[in-house]
Amino acid sequence: MSPFRKLLQKELKGPLLQKEVDNTSWVTEFPIEINEAVMARGQERFKIYCSVCHGLSGEGDGLVTQRAQLINCLYLGDSGSTFQ
C-alpha cells in the first residue's frame, strides 16, 4: 500500500469523522422567482464552474474526473472505479 493511501485512510478514519452533525433545517422553497433568465444564468454557471468535474450532462464524466481516475489507477493501483 502506498504511503499516500495510508495517509488518506488515516485522515478519513480520524478528524473528518469527528465533526459535529449539522442539524440546520433544509430549505423548503426557492428564495427567488424561477424564470427563463434564472435558468439560463444557472446553465451558464454550470458550464463554467461545474462541468469540468461533473461533465456537461452531469454524469460525473468531466475532464477533471477523468484525470483523477487516471491518477488513481496509475499511482494508487486501483481500477479507477471510485468515481463511477
Image (tube, helix red, strand yellow):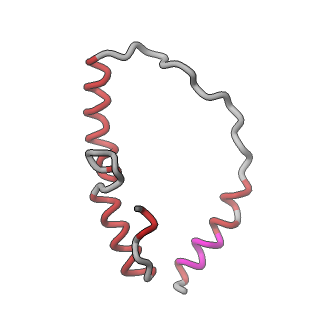
State which region is magenta: 5-10
Figure check: 57 above or below 75: above
Q: How far across and how far down the image is residue 9, in percent?
A: 61, 72
- The residue located at (43%, 82%) in the rendering is 77
Task: Give the vertical position of 77 relative to 33 (above or below).
Answer: below
Picture residue at 42% right of the left edge, 69% below the top: 81
Q: Residue 1 colored magenta?
A: no
Is-magenta flag for residue 8? yes
Q: Quadrant of residue 6?
A: bottom right
- Decide whether the magenta segment is chiefly helix, strand or loop: helix
| Above or below, comparing residue 65 to residue 76 in the picture | above
Where does residue 63 sit, x and y in percent of width and height? 27, 58
Please report the residue visible at 44 percent of the width from the left and 78 percent of the height from the top: 78
Pick the quarter of the image with the N terminus: bottom right
Question: Seen in the image, is 58 located left or right of residue 16?
Answer: left
Question: Residue 67 lies in what quarter of the image?
Answer: bottom left
**Relative side of 26 to 38, left or right:** right
How many labels sit on residues? Answer: 0
Residue at 63 percent across and 67 percent down: it is: 11
The residue at the far top in this view is 33
User: Residue 5 at x, y = what percent?
Assistant: 54, 77
